Amino acid sequence: MTPTLEKEIIKLPSDQDISGRTFGAEEIRAVTEVLQSGVLITTKGKYGKLLEKEFAEKLGVKYAYACNSGSAAVHVAVAAINPNPGDEIVTTSVTDMGALTPIIFQGAIPVFADVDPKTLNVTAETIEAVLSERTKAIIVTHLFGNPCEMKAIMELADSRNIPVIEDTAQSFLAKCDGKYAGTIGKIGAFSFQQGKQMTTGEGGIVVTNDDDLARRMYLFINKAWGYGDANPDHYFASLNYRMTELQAAVSYEQLKKLDYSVAQRQKMAALLDEKIADIDGIESYKPAENSTMTYWKFCLRVDDAKIEDGSVGLAKALKVYDVASAPRYVVKPAYKCMIFRDQNTFGDSQYPFNLARPEAVDYNDARFRGTIKGLHDVLVLPINEKYTEQHIEFLADSIREAVEATRK
Ligand SMILES: Cc1ncc(COP(=O)(O)O)c(C=O)c1O
């Protein structure tokens, strides 16, 4: 059944343009200042350094280094860990591809852990199931602004002496047991891509408290050139992953607005939660005990026993109200993508997969029941800091009507 339009359509603010973003006079002033200075490179300008200092201070960590994307941030983190070819890095079957390809570029094997179908996050149990003698690191992705259960994950990782990288691209200022996501493991990696809680279009940053990892991360971003050293050299294979001063100026100003953006998302999400709590057949994602969510997106689990065609059916019904939603998030688990399925890497070498243990690249769906179920059920709804109570009311009404129209 198609929902009937009985109310005025309200256009929801979009994080893909200014309607859902907080750019204003501050960013314009900072970018203009950079352009007028003529210094667009962060090795010479002030904004890259300011951003790194303020970001580290905000998160309460010793080091932060800016780079030019979230993918670069993950690459920098993996390179700092310095795996040998064929070493394994445990990661998640549900994440952005930018969190996965860096592992391959560093010659390591991504080993996918299954996820909790209720959150699409990895857990200590799913990680433990795929650890091996060759595990060099664990990367957790805190999806949708909802942190993984880090206490249990850190207990496991620490007991095996395995470093944890936290991909926090979607979860700025989310907290676990009072600590910011991204500061609990050895390294945190963030993305400033267009739709994130703070943005500069494309950009990223890595954080750590570890002196040696910090040094390697800094070098990896800077072609491994030992700036300021007595006898500088290009010490190892790396890239130029530097952000420009223009990006840094925007991120520096965005960082000042981050508390507001996160608080506003949390306030509006709480309101939406309240308004849809009684709707049978859907359930919103909730943070674990002692955790807080910062709502990159607002996710629902849709029960296909109650709703015709589940998340896909509900998404279609919501379109009538001009509400854009993404059923199944990334659509398919990472291991089903051609890069992994066909091992499309460097020439026809299949490197580094040609070094893998067969179990490490066993992509049988039976090993990923949480992933299959979680992706089947999830409906990803938009939210951002420009949402007002009026937007939430419209969204909640639209969800209620769409659910009733698709109820079995
Ligand atoms: C969880 C996660 N990791 C990594 C990335 C890659 O970041 P970027 O798009 O900035 O390269 C993204 C996407 O933005 C992401 O959502």
Image (spheres, rainbow, N blue to C red):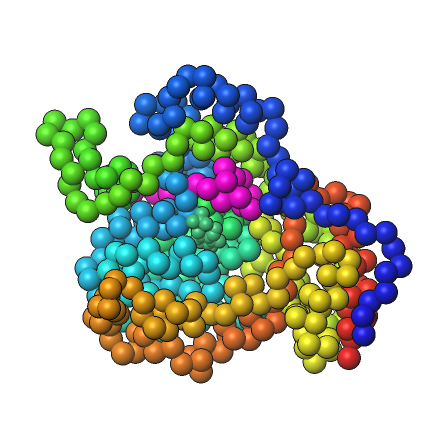
Main secondary structure found in the magenta portion: loop
**Stretch of the chain drawn in magenta:** 192-210
Can residue 51 be seen by looking at this rendering? no
Q: Which residue ends up furthest to the top in the rendered image?
A: 37
In the displayed structure, would residue 145 be above or below residue 38?
A: below
Q: Is residue 94 left or right of residue 360?
A: right
**Residue 329 showing in the rendered view:** yes
- Report how many numbered discs are placed on residues in the image: 0
Where residue 134 appears, as percent x and y from the top left, is: 23, 67
Residue name at image x 74 percent, y 62 percent: 318
* Residue 318 against residue 356 in the figure, above or below: above
User: Residue visible at 22% across and 72% down?
Assistant: 354
| Quadrant of the snapshot with the C terminus | bottom right
- Is 99 situated above or below 180? below
The quarter in which the N terminus is drawn is bottom right
Does residue 231 appear to the left or right of 291 in the view shown? left
Residue 385 forms part of the magenta stretch: no
